Amino acid sequence: MKMIEVRNLKKDYRIAKKRTGMMGSLKHLVMPRYETLEAVKGISFQIHEGESVAFLGLNGAGKSTTIKMLTGIMKPSEGTVRIMGKDPFLNRIENARRIGVVFGQKSQLWWDIPVIESFRLLKNIYSIPEEQYTRNMERFGEILGLHDFLSQPARKLSLGQRVRADLAASLLHEPPILFLDEPTIGVDVTAKQKIYEFLRETNSKKKTTILLTSHDMKDLESICQRLLILEKGKILFDDTIDKLLKEYGGEMTLEEIIIRLFEHEADHITG
Amino acid sequence: MKKYLAYIRCGFLEGCAYRSTFITGMLANFIQAVVLYYVWKSIFTYQEAVNGYTWEIMKQYVFVAFLCNSVFSMGFEMNIAERIVKGDIILDLLKPLSYRGMLFFRMLGTAGLEFAATFVLIGSVYLSVNGLQYLSGTRTALFLISLFLGMGVKFCIQYIFSLLCFYTDNSYGVTKAREILTNFFSGALIPLAMFPGVLREIVKYLPFQGIIYTPCCIFIGTFSVEESMISIFLQIVWIVVLGLLGSLLGKKAFGVISMYGG
């Protein structure tokens, strides 16, 4: 079953073209100039049920933009997105029920009230049955070690604790699709291991489809089988990680291959 | 519905989280109400009546208007505006419920505590100044309905203003502009009956009077029961109109979400 279907997806941003210096700022105030930036330049791909796919690309390659369009919070400039057969932007509320999202740089936990209250709220928002809620809270609590800080407000958590709690929050309603945008940012090695273990289990047992972006190769290799490399808004590579390793003779690590790939691409563009 | 009620609870807990902010806020409210009272008192020592308003009416109006204005104050609105500017709004949009509905109930929860405390505080000040002589059961009941509808009108206006933050980064400017506009045209500072001719006419055709002036006049009795009914109906009309306008503008605004990078 096709969980995610993307066809010729494009996103343009209109950004202010600011000039430098004092005169430049004044000029911009009177007569602002804008330019169009093509963040995503027509990409197409499909993801099936139970797949775990990693999005890889340099800063500004269009990864987060694509995720935002897939989750239905941003309107594509062109092209179509189908999440389980439906347009996520037009069916935002329906789509939100089927997906779980973690943005590593943001938190959905309430800043000033105990973490457990955020979870209780999610239980009501998604109408999670009592039995499912207790079961998941126990399982997540154990694997991710949440029990120590559930009564603390989110502002008192360390970054690693916060990310773990956010991960649990995104999976409480057992969504068939999970989007993770840099979920291990600022997380220590042991916490990372816990997160990997947790995600692998969710992926294999629950058949949850996972789409992940990260700059950490360890993340990608530990969680995902398939790799989608984005470069300047276009797809550079779309196949399994194993295949990429084989193509380069099986001697190099993923990180070395990626560095070479991007260097080669840069040469190609400048030369 | 249950999911929206859950937001009242969280909003309430959030409101309780900062005890000292709450206490100082209340103290500031109290001082402000008392100052307003004395300002009007001194005005009326030089003049018997202003456009039909006497000191008898005014010493009720000051406190009732203050109570009406204390619901849905500016703090929470700033918070929403900032979430839009910073891009945190995407987390709210990822939830399977209406964004506006969520805001309303969350705000209701946060405002609940503040309103209850103001109600007790300003209520007792009102009673110690005016006693029970002006109170009437029917008018109080109509007042409470009108007060609730006034909150609706205020919320609709706040929502429309917050959408402006999709186009500008200045969340403080947007919320401050909204506050000044509503404070002046709703009758929070000066009863609308005291406005000079043309302005008085204009204000009649604006939605702002429904926030404070309408419930105040109903409570004090400057509106007859029939007039009260008509103005309550007008409040409902404005909620519908502003609500539709908000939906329309919301559709446009959500289409321009474009947080590049973050």
Image (cartoon, coloured by chain):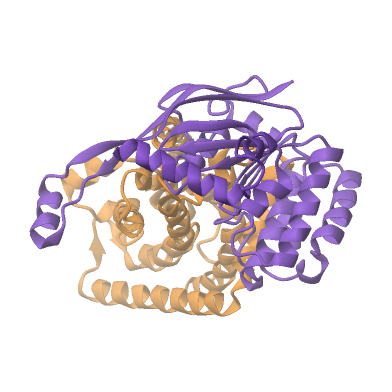
Chain colours: A purple, B orange
How many numbered markers are drawn? 0
Image quadrant assignment for residue B120? bottom right
**Residue at 62% across, 32% down:** A93
Name the one closer to the observer, A123 or A26: A26
Relative vertical location of residue B70 with respect to residue B38 in this rendering, above or below: above
Q: How far from the left and from the top, in percent, is residue B127?
A: 53, 72
Q: How far from the left and from the top, in percent, is residue B232?
A: 48, 39
Name the one closer to the observer, B79 or B154: B79
| Quarter of the image where the N terminus of chain B is located | top right
Can see residue A143? Answer: yes
Name the one closer to the observer, B86 or A35: A35
Left or right: where does residue B213 sit relative to residue A253? left
**Residue at 54% across, 37% down:** A229
**Residue at 50% across, 58% down:** B71
Q: How far from the left and from the top, in percent, is residue B18?
A: 59, 74
Q: How far from the left and from the top, in percent, is residue B69?
A: 44, 59
Relative vertical location of residue B39 with respect to residue A243 in this rendering, above or below: below
Can see residue B145? Answer: no
Relative vertical location of residue A99 with respect to residue B46 in this rendering, above or below: above
Left or right: where does residue A195 sit relative to residue B32? right
Relative vertical location of residue B108 with respect to residue A155 in this rendering, above or below: above
Image quadrant assignment for residue A266? top left
